[in-house]
Image (cartoon, grey):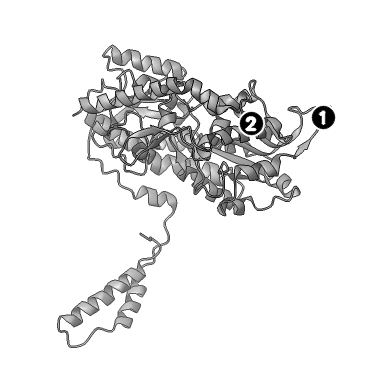
Amino acid sequence: MSFKRISAMLAAGIMLSACILSACGEESAPDVAAATTAAETSAPETEELSEVELRAQVSDDLPEADFDGYTFRVVIENYIGDWYDIPELTGDIVDDAVYKRNLAVSERFNAKFEYIAPGDYTAVGNWMQKTVLAAEDAFDLGIHHVVNASKVVLKGVFLDWYQVPHIDLTKPWWNRSNIEDLTYAGVAPIVIGDYVLNAVSGTYCMFYDKVVADSYGISDMYGTVNDGKWTIDLMSALTENVYTDLNGDNQRNRDDYYGFATGAASNIGAYLWAFNNPVCTKNSDGTISVTIKSDKMNQIVEKLNKICWENTGTYYAPGGDDHHNGGINMFRENKAMFANGGIGSAVALRDFEHDFGIIPYPKWDEQQVDYRELVDGSHCCELIPITTTDLERSGVIIEALNAESYKQVIPVYFETALKVKYSRDNESVQILDMLLANRFFDFGYVYDGWEGASFWLEGLVQKHNSDFESFYAKNEKKMNKHYDKVFAYLEELAAAQG
């Protein structure tokens, strides 16, 4: 529904009333023009609502409740506390939004929050598993590394979110993939909502230096993207020969300038989803098939190996400090024209001396309909333990935390911190909207547990191995065994729930 103006609607209503009166036998129809003028004069015009105002109008449909000062315990990894545990206003726009979210939920339902940080993601997974299997009521909500979470899920320690009262996965603060991709046999022990901010910041994208690009005759990347022409072949063509030996040692190394810079880990793996070649695909009957072995998979591996290992203009360095973040590291140091990273990397570029643009990963070809963006596997998901003693209370608080994140935190982080404070142009704003809308959470990635196929592509490229067929034949049995185990567990969970 448009929120731009109400006067036209009022006028239409008056005209409709006039028609009804006439049909009911009134001697003459009212002066519609006069009535319309009067309505427009008396009815105040409503300005178009902002994104924040529109979000605030979405009801969470939660009941009134008083939880008597209950301490709601959230398990987090020790390095992400500043997205959850903010005890006071700091003056930082994102910190303050997190603080206000927590305060709003706390005051509304008379509850307090406690944050438990056992260590890194391995320690968190082990701690949750240990406490639940010991039947300890130790926490209410787990915020956990999504790939590691799937390993813990198979231990039978988490509930199906469809069984939690007041959790409505159709609401906009829950990613659509929860229903479309992560629900199997009618159950979903892992979900991703807006309470998890790194599921936004970890969304893969590309950055490009507008000044340098323009010097190479590359002047309208946004038009290229919007026309659907931003493909991997074009990226290769634009960057393959862009190279300058900055230190004059006649050797290609980190001290030189490149057309394209990338990390060697999930930065490369993300191309699998960018090319719309997911590990698993949901079928129309609700079943899920392993689909990584597609008609184009061989070409994908060959093309990325060529770009990373053979193009003069590519900086690619498996291992070392740049293994994960080589792209954004080189870009920030003014050593790359194009680079990949996550949208949260824009924060680190606020002092970048040139104008830069933000664009999606390229498509496979122009026939591919959409740009698709993977979120790095280090992002978190939400988990609720089977030891939960009051599902009504947990459902209300968790739904409220995600709803208030959607209303208060995401607008500040995405609209203000990234778009206004750090992003350089309005066209990047539109691209950021596209990136967030096109985030993709593949069942095969979320339930990989480092035993599936989600990390095959980056591993093959790291070894400069283009023989996907042989690799697949060697690893197919183990991969299928893993996903069959996941399917079987979820089917058992569904059966146990009746």
Quickly name the residue at label 1: 247
Q: Nearer the viewer, residue 45 or 207?
A: 207
Q: Nearer the viewer, residue 425 or 307?
A: 307
Residue drawn at x 29%, y 33% is 397
Left or right of 201 in this view: 25: left
Quickly name the residue at label 2: 305
What element does badge 2 sit on? Answer: helix
Q: Position of residue 215 (x, y in %)?
A: 76, 48
Quadrant hosting residue 173: top left
Tell me the amino acid under the disc marked 2: Asn
The answer to whether residue 72 shows anywhere in this view is: no
Left or right of 334 in this view: 325: left
Left or right of 243 in this view: 444: left
What element does badge 1 sit on? Answer: loop
Q: Is residue 287 above or below residue 431?
A: above
* Image quadrant in which the N terminus is located: bottom left
Q: Nearer the viewer, residue 22 or 163?
A: 163
Q: Nearer the viewer, mark 1 or mark 2?
A: 2
Q: Position of residue 304 (x, y in %)?
A: 62, 34
Residue drawn at x 33%, y 48% is 58
The answer to whether residue 470 shows anywhere in this view is: yes
